[in-house]
Image (cartoon, rainbow, N blue to C red):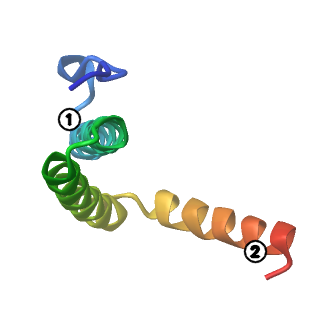
Amino acid sequence: MLSQIPIDLKKVNKENIDTEILRAGIIAELDAVNLYEQMAAMTENKDIKEILLDIAKEEKTHVGEFQTLLLRLDKQQVTELEKGKKEVEKELGN
């Protein structure tokens, strides 16, 4: 993982450990997506580009898996995601 986990998971309260683990997983997967997509943009080799983009797509699925679990555990996150969606729709007039 290129980025550092923003917190020391050993210091997290037991009641919050699962949500923090899931958030760290999301961070790691997003890092991987960025890395693979950047490398795909750099290469001129069609085969390498295709494989990198396929792997990036798989990492996006992993983000979705972690997010699904996070939303089961953190109802405030569900509420805030919905608020964010509504704000964007309002700003863009959709």
Name the kind of residue labelled 1 in the image. Answer: Lys
Instruction: Tell me, for residue 14, which label it has, or none.
Output: 1
* Separation (CA) of disc 2 from disc 1: 37 Å
Give the crowd class for mark 2: few <14, some 14-19, many >=20 residues within 10 Å. Answer: few
Instruction: Tell me, for residue 89, which label it has, or none.
Output: 2
Q: Quadrant of the C terminus?
A: bottom right
- Residue 62 sits in quarter: bottom left
Name the kind of residue labelled 2 in the image. Answer: Glu
Give the residue displayed 51% in from the left and 59% down from the top. 76
Image coords of residue 87 (percent x, y): 76, 66
Give the residue displayed 19% in from the left and 48% down from the top. 52
Q: Quadrant of the N terminus?
A: top left
Indicate whether 54 appears above or below 93: above
Image coords of residue 69 (percent x, y): 24, 63
Give the crowd class for mark 1: few <14, some 14-19, many >=20 residues within 10 Å. Answer: few
Q: Nearer the viewer, mark 2 or mark 1?
A: 2
Indicate whether 52 appears above or below 62: above
Give the residue displayed 23% in from the left and 64% down from the top. 61
Image coords of residue 27 (percent x, y): 33, 38
First-in-chain label (2 vs 1):
1
Judge by depth and name the residue closer to the eye, 44 or 60: 44
Give the residue displayed 22% in from the left and 24% down from the top. 9
